[in-house]
Image: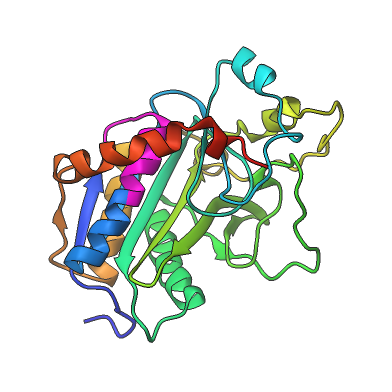
Amino acid sequence: MHSRRSFSPWRLLIAAPRSGAENMARDVALQARAARTGETVFSVYSWSRPTVSFGRNQPAIGFYDLGKVRSAGLDVVRRPTGGRAILHHREVTYSVTAPVKDSLSLRETYSQINRILQTGLSRLGVMVEAAAPSERAVVPSTRPCFQMPAEGELIAAGCKLVGSAQWRDERALLQHGSILVNDDQSSLPGLAANAGSGSETIAPATLHALLGRSPDVSEVASAMFDAVRSLEDAHASELAEEEVREEALEQVPHFLDEDWTWRR
């Protein structure tokens, strides 16, 4: 048993590409499932259409232009977790849902999940480290999430590769994040409501740049699942998406609600 293990048992889910609303609904359903069953699920998924996701508390109206977003052929969704805007297209998304342990803080669970991500990425041939605290506070803007790492987010060669955020209630947590395969994030400032807003960009790290190729979702999932089994639960078993699909579909209308998506 790993000395830092705190979640048990683990299940592993690779989901079919879904819309933004369906992906977020499934993560919320998995969080509810964690509270009910006591199981932790590590899932890996992709998006059926290029989709901009806003952070839970990120202002949208007055910052982003819905007309520009639609003209670019992008869907929009708001995440149940925090952070700034991400374009989900040429990337791989992961999520972890787990019952909350009273003895473990958000920082401790974040660090534990980071160890899985770091181990999984190392199996792909990518070495990453956690970003140090920044002296600059993050303010609302149209700057891409990947322009600047927050404390603890994973960087390679000084640039952000994995963006993550966690949300928890009294019973269960959801942490999910994006692992960039290629860089689409620099297009986000072009969707700003005000010309020139957030125009400064810093290129993030990508798996393609670091590896010289673009691993697919199944390869990333395999590396992450191996990391779960080596660090947390050697007997982690697969979870079929169908087991949570009905509950997830009940949550979809919330994530299709434009009042929620575009709220200030």
What segment is highlighted magenta in the picture?
A: 15-28
Q: Is residue 186 left or right of residue 235?
A: right
Q: Visible in this render: residue 85? A: yes
Q: Residue at x 22, y 44 (%)?
A: 247
Horizontal side of 2 relative to 72 (left or right) equals: left
Of 260 and 34, the residue lying toward us: 260
Which residue: 26% across, 71% down?
232
Residue 196 image offset from top left, x and y in percent: 87, 30
Q: Quadrant of residue 251?
A: top left
Most extreme residue toward the front, as rendered?
A: 259
Q: Is residue 230 above or below residue 67?
A: below
The colour scheme applied to this rendered structure is rainbow
Indicate whether residue 161 is drawn in magenta. no
Q: Position of residue 99 (x, y in %)?
A: 29, 70
Q: Is residue 216 visible?
A: no
Considering only vertical position in the picture, is 113 above or below 212? Answer: below
Depth check, front residue: 152 or 230: 152
Residue extending farthest to the right is 196
Q: In the shown orientation, is residue 230 left or right of residue 89?
A: left
Task: Report the residue at 15% width, 44% height from top.
Answer: 240
Say which quadrant the C terminus sits in: top right
At horizontal 41% and vertical 67% (from top left) the residue drawn is 169
- Residue 26, x across and y down, in percent: 31, 44
Relative image position of residue 161 (x, y in whole percent): 57, 50
Residue 46 versus residue 110 in the image, above or below: above
Classify residue 31 by image quadrant.
Answer: bottom left
